[in-house]
Amino acid sequence: MFRQDLNPTGSLTVSALLALLPLIVLLVLLGGFRWKAHWASLVALALSLAIAVLTYSMPVRQALDAGVFGAALSVLNILWITFNAIWIYNLTVRSGHFAVLRRAFASISDDRRIQAIVIAFSFGALLEALAGGGSPVAICAVMLIAIGFDPIKAAALALIADTAPVAFGGLGNPITILGTTTGLAPEDFGAMAGRQTAILAVFVPFILIGVADGRRGLRQAWPAALTAGLTFGICQFLFSNFWSYKLCDIFAALVSAGAIILLNRVWHPREAAVATPVIAGGSADVPDAAFERRVGRDDSAGDVFKAFAPYIIIVVLFSLAQITAVKNWLTTHGVWTFDWPGLHVLTPKGKPANTAYVLNYLGATGTLLFVSGLFTLIVLRMSPIAGLRTYGETIRQFGWAIFTIFCVFAISYVMNLSGQISTLGVWLAKAGGFFAFLAPVVGWFGVTITGTDAGSNALFGNLQVTAAHQLNVAPTLFGAANTSGGVMAKMISPQNLAVGTAAVGIVGAEGTLFRRVFGWSVLLLLLMCLLVWLQSTPVLGWMVP
């Protein structure tokens, strides 16, 4: 039996700096030395194991087992979701219906600023809600190039737009991970996050049209930005608080897109910014004769329905899964929970640490996506062999990213179960009431390192809860602040920058893209820090459930 010691060196500051060392090394190797993410994460994992064993006196066998436990959790919580979500997207590309989908979006308006909001903000949010993992950046950036944006600006727009929905991305996976890591109800974290990111959502479309067309865009297209931001934010708040945090982004995305379509029937910008397709390193359609034929022809109602069908299937299937009777049946018949073998860890208070593995094989997000993919095969009239071949190609797309995800989750659980994360929480809590301002920065730092909000919550969820208990603050506030602050780092994470540049055919321009979006990341982060700090005071304390 291993009992955590939160101050193994006798100096809390020294213990905290040692606990922080693996994260600093990971960031320096990624950003400073430009190492590949898988090698940088492997070094950080080795360092976290060494500190767990040599400083925190965790038995070697249990330290290694904690890493395996974390990696095993990532299979169901990250990989199974992402594989199936990208598989569905690849099926639409293989069948040709993704091109139909892109043309359908282009028909909404002939103004590319409005198209940018619908594609990057609304459709990107839908992709984030269903899949996450960089797919909104890759898909939306290519679509933005097709309507006339240069590659760097297209990637920047896709990255900036992928902020407001991230806290609930992958069908609420970051919130679910936060609940799993901390042992608290994810619904409470979801409700609190909905009272933070919904406010952020109102501003994001304004930033998009400002980046797309400067002050002229803000003067001429602000009604579209206001419509999209308000409808998205209101839906995100209502669904995360009163129905299901897993579905809030789906409906927020659909409602915001529908609101823009309705607005476009009664209002148009004074001067339209007409879309003109451009070339981007072969990652978008080249405007040759064949391109003109593809874009110029009218798609039948059946083709358009099939293009949207995968996403309709997902929405319907997940909505059904939220019905109480269905949810109870899935939980009763499709969940196997067991204590992870070999892990015997006590917290400093003598309570057993949470080492339960919940194998939710029927109702898991990834399983529902897989079933949605099977229905997609039927609707698109693709053979099982084509579906299987596409699935294999999808897994090969990830390559070393799979190893990276294993390492990142292994790091988080080695640090959590050895006590390193709790040490950081106790140390940061010494900042007193000012920690409320810093809580989103912790999440921002976590996403910068891991590339995902779910990874940041797995890494720092316990830190936030520990700090909250130390300061006698509602743990839901700081836990939600971790996920809400982290969303602003999606646009500057090395992994997402690489996805953006690869998608638009400018690999190697990550530094240029980073400089384009860094200022917006910091500005939005400061706004979130101010909001969370006010929510910790009587000024906005009434917003905490």
Image (cartoon, rainbow, N blue to C red):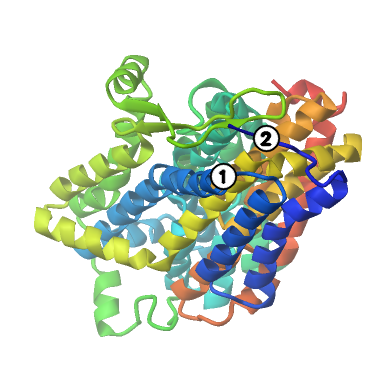
**Nearest-to-viewer mark from 1 and 2:** 1
The quarter of the picture where residue 191 lies is: top right
Instruction: Quadrant for residue 139, please give it.
Output: bottom left
Identity of the residue drawn at 58% across and 72% down: 153
Mark 1 or 2 closer to N-term? 1
Task: Please give the name of the residue rendered at 16% of the width and 47% of the height, measured from the top-left corner.
Answer: 379
Q: Which residue lies furthest to the top in this view?
A: 325
Q: Residue 479 carries which label?
A: 2
The answer to whether 94 is drawn above or below residue 1 in the figure is below
Reply above or below: 530 against 352: below
Nearer to the camera, 117 or 328: 328
Q: Which of 228 and 312 is in front in this view?
A: 312
At mark 2, the secondary structure is helix
Give the percent coordinates (x, y) of residue 485.
69, 46
Residue at mark 1 to residue at mark 2: CA–CA distance: 17 Å
x then y, percent, for residue 231:
57, 37
Q: In which quarter of the image is the C terminus?
A: top right
Q: What numbered label is drawn on residue 147?
A: none
Q: How crowded is mark 2: few (under 14 residues within 10 Å), some or many (20 or more)?
A: many
Amino acid carrying mark 1 in the image = Tyr
Q: Which residue is drawn at 38% across and 42% down?
A: 76
Query: Left or right: 183 with respect to 535?
Result: left
The answer, for residue 114, to whether it is visible in the render is yes
Residue 9 percent coordinates (x, y)? 82, 47
Measured as percent of width and height from the top left, residue 528 is found at 75, 44
Quarter of the picture holding the N terminus: top right
Tell me the element at label 1. Answer: helix
Q: Nearer the viewer, residue 429 or 528?
A: 429
Look at mark 1 in the image and give the residue it sits on. Answer: 413
Q: Are marks 1 and 2 in contact (CB under 8 Å)?
A: no
- Kindly identify the amino acid type of the residue bearing the numbered disc 2: Gly
